[in-house]
Amino acid sequence: MSNFNIFAVRAMYHFEMSRFRRTLMQSLIAPVLSTALYFVVFGAAIGERMQQMGGISYGAFIVPGLIMLSLLTQSVSNAAFGIYFPKFTGTIYELLSAPVSYFEIVLAYVGAAASKSIILGLVILATAATIVPLEIEHPLWMMLFLVLTSVTFSLLGFIIGIWADGFEKLQIIPMLIITPLTFLGGSFYSIDMLPPLWRTISLFNPVVYLISGFRWSFHGTADVGISISLGMTLGFLAVFLAIVAWIFRTGYKLKT
Amino acid sequence: MQPIISVANLSKTYASGFYALKNVSLDIRPGEIFALLGPNGAGKTTLISTVCGIVTPSSGRVTVDGHDILDDYRAARSLIGLVPQELTTDAFETVRATVTFSRGLFGLRANPAHIEKVLKELSLWDKKDNTIRTLSGGMKRRVMIAKALAHEPRILFLDEPTAGVDVELRRDMWALVRALRASGVTIILTTHYIDEAEEMADRIGVISKGELILVEEKVELMRKLGKKQLTLHLQQPLDNIPPALAAYGLTLADKGNDLIYSYDARDAEHDSSSIAALLGDLAATGIHFKDLQTTQSSLEDIFVTLVSDRK
Ligand SMILES: Nc1ncnc2c1ncn2[C@@H]1O[C@H](COP(=O)(O)OP(=O)(O)OP(=O)(O)O)[C@@H](O)[C@H]1O
Ligand SMILES: [Mg+2]
């Protein structure tokens, strides 16, 4: 018996991705459309009257933040739904009775959710590029942040999906925590523009570091240092990995 | 013979504190059809779920072909196919996709020929490209069986496979189970239809309130507990049993119109002289009957007696 069930990982990943293809409308079109609306409202309408942000047009300035906004919410909700749904329908029995390890389940489900987010992020980026002139100073770093953020927040979504025992709980964390934190995390402004007190408070918002690092990869300027941003992202990844490991060690909410 | 599944002192207490299995020990023989009977809530599904890895045992040990279900779960689980009691399917997948998925999940390389064979055996081949939500309940149940067979398991668990299934499909399923057994697959099924167990099983286990109260060869069980009754409808009613017939342990029924003789089916097989003697003695005493009838208790009677004895 080998120690890694590659066929199972493939099967689960493929299964999740085909669910994605089936729901392409919701999965892709909706976030792209809402992002386009943000551009029209903030970039074109309001942005015209805004000063340049450190030499960058306001429209270009908000691109990284908008991608992050979609990336975070979509990673969390995709991954949460992906693992919650089999629990809800009962088809999880098959995963639990199959010769697969928890690690393989996480790899496939989080991998699929992260893949979707990465595709989504790139599609939004391409959409943005057609609306505002865009330059990416550090494309490799951009990809690194894109991938790391997608994986990290898909892990968070996975945790939520396991924890949730109803559809409300699935929605509540993205709605009450992720979206506000992203809006207040400098998607649409630089935290340097805030009064000192609010600036300090903002530094407790973890999303600030994600957006800042991502923005740096685009424009070469950031609210906080790139190494701090990277460190924070990796820190989240470590925390969520630890929680997932704990869930699986204890069988929390999966097995009775 | 080495058992294919060995359950030793298995207990399960759910998080709610409910004691669903109490010290269950059971060996399943390779190649047999084992029927697990018991009333609702007895613990049949819990037992199956534990062996399959869905429920964690509280104590005790289970091995499948020598592999511990916890320490060596990959080897143990890859031998098992499970058709759960509830119809749970991915509504939006196609039949073929979901069955192919199951094979991959169990660590096997894709094999379209095997999937085709399984779908054809279950009369699902012409539905292969339909999404599952467009199928009838009976077809969905067959899809679940196809999923369980996709990885060519050596052991198949069928948790109430014929609940809500029409007569024809039931017959088909029995035929399928027999064919699987003939190909060497060990089958453990639960059912509330006792005729099904009677028809299919090699051995029968009865579980009640989490305890395995009996495991027996079906034939043996029928013999051991199967009482036969000879009922004689008399020409003239009797007020009481004549002393000359006292040795037979007869009883009267229907206001003295029926004379009932109970005997062991097993004894009767070995020697039928007691019936002949009874009839001779009846004639000698001047008792005449107009008709007679024999009945043998079914597994159902046996089962009801067993379970109610423990209440
Ligand atoms: N997850 C659970 N948490 C708490 N109690 C449970 C759980 N699952 C089952 N039980 C209880 O355990 C007992 C055995 O249930 P089980 O499903 O094993 O019965 P069963 O013999 O399969 O019944 P049926 O013939 O109705 O399918 C029942 O009393 C049930 O309420
Ligand atoms: Mg049951």
Image (cartoon, coloured by chain):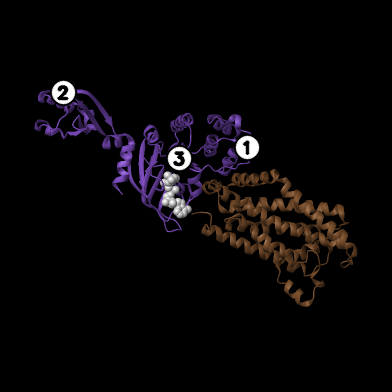
Mark 2 residue CB less than 8 A from any atom of ligand 1: no
Q: Quadrant of ligand 2?
A: top left
Residue at image mark 1: B131
**Quadrant of residue B192 in the image?**
top left
Q: Earlier in the sequence, mark 3 or mark 1?
A: 1
Q: Position of residue B146 (x, y in %)?
A: 54, 36
Residue A68 vs residue A112: left or right? right
Kindly indicate whether the residues beneath marks 3 and 1 are on one polypeptide chain. Answer: yes
Q: Amino acid at mark 1?
A: Thr
Tell me if label 2 and label 1 are in contact, CB under 8 Å.
no
The residue shown at (75%, 59%) is A68
In the figure, is residue B212 to the left or right of B88? Answer: left
Q: Colour of chain A?
A: brown
Q: Which residue matches tag 3? A: B160
Residue placed under numbered mark 2 in the picture? B288
Residue B63 visible in the picture: no
